[in-house]
Image (cartoon, rainbow, N blue to C red):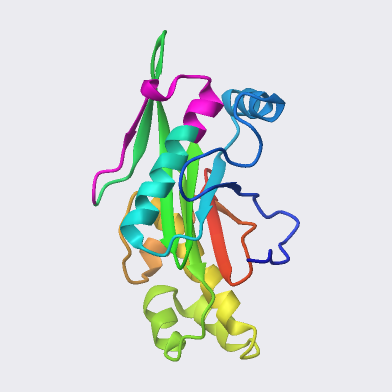
Amino acid sequence: MTAASSPLDAVPVRWWPAAGGAGDGVPGGAGSRRLVANFDAGDDAVVLGVQGQAERELARGAIRDAIAAELASLSGLAPAQVALYTPAGQVPWAELGYPAGPRRAWLAISHDGVLSVAAISLRGPVGIDVSCIVDIPDWEAVARDYLGPDVTARLAALAPDARPAAFARAWSEREARLKYLGRELVEWSLEGDRELSACRCLPLALPEGYAGVLALPP
């Protein structure tokens, strides 16, 4: 895959191989020590991903393996001291078994196409979503039901060739905000829109053909 041009504020993704191994940089090396220092100092989130796995169950396993390995690298703990919990229908989390006592890490995970991405935070809830950029014939009805009248109007004002990418980013933003609040996908409502505004969103730096968003505390 070729990298797409990303906004200057796009959040970089630390890519891990689909079947084990190290991600960008060498765990335990200088880059890893820098990440540990930044992570413990209170960075909002670390974002990682796996490419090339379209089968959903295999993708879930690959991103869970990457999260566990990344947490071990970031925290300096042995892999056996990192416990990952991803119960179906619930917000995933991890527990870091520090000698002074366990510490919680908040997680968010998303899959689409051949990409899987995850966000890790020590500060509190986090949300993330990735979407394939595709031309959706009934985009207007979907946007009206799930994204609201303002977003639908903005999408309608775009040139047809610009709309798929804008729709994918708007959809990912809504999904990331919902995950930040620990909620399932629901249709748009004015009250719900106000609640979803309780976080800030940043685009992800993703390969061409994908859009993604990270949701963080205000």
* Residue 19 point in image, percent of width and height: 46, 47
Query: Could you tell me how many numbered marks the image carries?
Result: 0
Front residue of 55 and 72: 55
Q: Which residues are magenta?
A: 70-88
* Residue 217 point in image, percent of width and height: 52, 43
Up/down of 132 relative to 38, above or below: below
Q: Is residue 127 visible?
A: yes
Front residue of 30 and 93: 30
Up/down of 45 relative to 114, above or below: above
Position of the C terminus, as image quadrant, is: top right
Front residue of 154 and 168: 168
Q: Residue furthest right?
A: 8
* Residue 185 in which image quadrant: bottom left
Residue at left offset 43%, top offset 47%: 63
Residue at left offset 64%, top offset 32%: 26
* Residue 212 point in image, percent of width and height: 55, 61
Position of the N terminus, as image quadrant, is: bottom right
Whether the magenta-drawn stretch holds residue 77 is answered as: yes
* Residue 207 in which image quadrant: bottom right
Whether the magenta-drawn stretch holds residue 135 is answered as: no
Q: Is residue 123 visible?
A: no
130 relative position to 28: left or right: left
Front residue of 25 and 202: 25
Up/down of 140 relative to 209, above or below: below
208 relative position to 94: left or right: right
Q: Residue furthest top?
A: 100
* Residue 150 point in image, percent of width and height: 52, 77
Residue at left offset 51%, top offset 34%: 70
Residue at left offset 60%, top offset 33%: 43
